[in-house]
Image: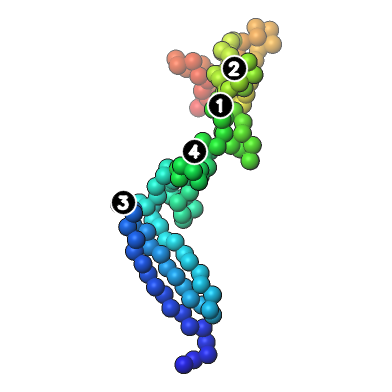
Amino acid sequence: MNKGIVLLIFVFFISSGDALQQYQQVYKSGVIRVRRQTSPENCSGGKVWRGGRCQCSYNTSWNEETQLCTQSCPNGKIRRRGRCICPLSKIWDSELGLCSDPPACTAGMVWRSRSCRCPHLSSLDPETQVCTCIYGTYQALDGTCRTLM
């Protein structure tokens, strides 16, 4: 027998419900490594196929008690860089204690990046305090500003 590394692979198929999971035990130099191989069809408990494995979808985390993916941020917040914040389309309402719809914008402005701003290709006219199309654009029938070319 060669003094090199002896590699034995045992493949087991275990069926849990309709999910088929493949387990491999690899014996290498006396050390046992267990790898679990799954495929997109095998994801369960709210998990999705991402990064080559089953993971909880964005803004959720695995709950060991229920064995399900659950919301990791309360009150309608989303997780960004490890913190729970309101989405850009919402604003934090301290009275209600949750993310709510932003106030209505006036003067042709739209809610963008947590404030009322003039839409694309328009700017705030200092005299009338209304959003108007910038030079070289025109206002289309749907109210948006478009380039002349």
Task: Looking at the image, tell me whether mark 4 or mark 3 is earlier in sequence order.
Answer: 3
**Would you say 126 lies left or right of 66 here?**
right
Task: Looking at the image, tell me whether mark 1 or mark 2 is earlier in sequence order.
Answer: 1
Residue 36 drawn above or below residue 119: below
Kind of residue at disc 1: Asn
Residue 39 drawn above or below residue 8: above
The spot of residue 95 in percent (x, y) is 63, 15
Kind of residue at disc 4: Thr
Q: Which residue is mark 3?
A: 17
**Would you say 131 lies left or right of 36 here?**
right
The spot of residue 135 in percent (x, y) is 61, 20
Distance, label 4 to label 3, CA atoms, is 21 Å
Q: Which residue is mark 2?
A: 96
- Labelled pair 1, 4 in contact (Cβ < 8 Å): no
Q: Which residue is mark 4?
A: 70
Local secondary structure at mark 4: strand
Distance, label 1 to label 3, CA atoms, is 34 Å
- Labelled pair 4, 3 in contact (Cβ < 8 Å): no
Task: Looking at the image, tell me whether mark 1 or mark 3 is earlier in sequence order.
Answer: 3
The spot of residue 31 in percent (x, y) is 54, 75
Kind of residue at disc 3: Gly
* Residue 93, numbered label: none
- Labelled pair 1, 3 in contact (Cβ < 8 Å): no
Identify which residue is drawn at 51% across, 83% down: 5
The spot of residue 65 in percent (x, y) is 49, 43
